[in-house]
Image (cartoon, helix red, strand yellow):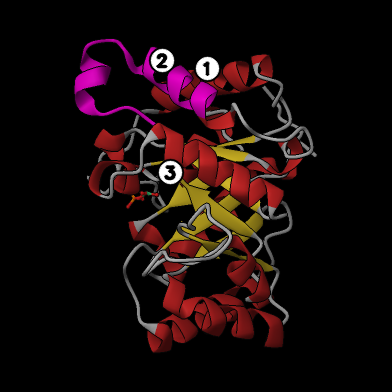
Amino acid sequence: MARSLRPLVIGNWKMNLDHVEAVHLTQQLGVLLRATPAEHADVALAPPFVDLRSVSSVVESERMPVAVTAQHVNPHDSGAHTGEVSVAMLRRLGVTSVIVGHSERRQNYAMTDEVVAATLRAVGVGGLAPVLCVGEDLELREAGRHESHVRAQLESAVAGLEARVPETLSVAYEPIWAIGTGVSATTEEVRAMTAFVRATLGALGFADSRVLYGGSVNADTAAELASAGGVDGFLVGGASLRADSFFAIVQATSGCYAGQR
Ligand code: PGA
C-alpha cells in the first residue's frame, strides 16, 4: 500500500558517543547528506542528553536538514527531580522531538504505562513531537499475545493526549526480541504489525501518525523493509552509530518512497 506520509529515519544513539564523538559523527553525516540529499525522507538524530547542544550546534551551523531528538524526558515542568530534564529545557536546546517509552526505559528504569502516558502528554503539550515506542517481548510473541499487548500499550499511552497532537505523533513498533540482537523481524511480521498499529491508532483518532519500525535495522535490510514492510520510517540503534551505515538506511528509505509521492 502506498503511504502518503513522508518517512522519518531516527538514529537512536542510546548511551553511546561523548560530545566530541557526537560532533564528529554529525559532521560526517552532514558531508554525506550534502553530497546526496535525502529528498524523500526526514532525518533525526537522538544523542544522549549531554550531546544535544553540540549536535544542534553542528546541525545549525552546517544547515543540515536534520532534526534533533531527545531519548527521554521527565513529564514534570520543574522541581525536585534529581538527574532529570524537562521538555522546556529540551526545547531551548533546539530539540524538536522526544522518544517516549523506549523498551529499555520501560524494562530497566521502571517506566510504567502511566509514566509513559504522562510523558507523552507533557511532550505534546510542550510543543515537541513525541515518538512513542511500543512492542512485545519474546514470551508474548510466542504466546500469540503481541497484538493485544501492543494495543494495550497504545491505548494507555494516548489516553490523555490532546487533539492537536495527532499530526506530530510517531509510533515506533519495536519488538524487544529484535532490538540489538541482529535479528530483525521479518518483512511479513513488520508489515502485519505496522498495519495493526496503524489500524489501532486510527480507531483511537490518530490516523495521521507515522508508524516506524525499529529492531536491528541495517543498511542491508532497510530497503526491503521500507518497500514491503509498510513502514513510515525507522528507529535505528546500532547501525546509527556509524555515518555510512546510517546514511545508507536513510538513502534506502528515501529511494523507496521516491516513486510514491
Ligand atoms: P537496534 O536498536 O537498531 O540496535 O536494534 C533499535 C532501538 O532500540 O531503537
Q: Which residue is mark 2?
A: 147
Amino acid of disc 1: Phe
Q: Residue at x 36, y 62 (%)?
A: 14
Query: Where does the image place residue 125, in percent across and percent down from the top left?
Result: 70, 48
Other-residue count near label 3 (Cα within 10 Å), few / some / many at <14 / 14–19 / ≥20: many
Q: Are marks 1 and 3 in contact (CB under 8 Å)?
A: no
Say whether mark 1 is within 8 Å of ligand 1. no
| Rendering coords of residue 140 (x, y %) | 25, 19
Q: Cα distance, mark 1 to mark 3?
A: 19 Å
Which mark is drawn over residue 196?
1
Q: Earlier in the sequence, mark 3 or mark 2?
A: 3
Mark drawn on residue 240:
none
Q: Amino acid at mark 3?
A: Gly
Position of residue 259 in the picture relative to residue 171 (left or right) = right
The reply to whether discs 2 and 1 touch (Cβ–Cβ < 8 Å) is yes
Q: Which residues are magenta?
A: 134-156
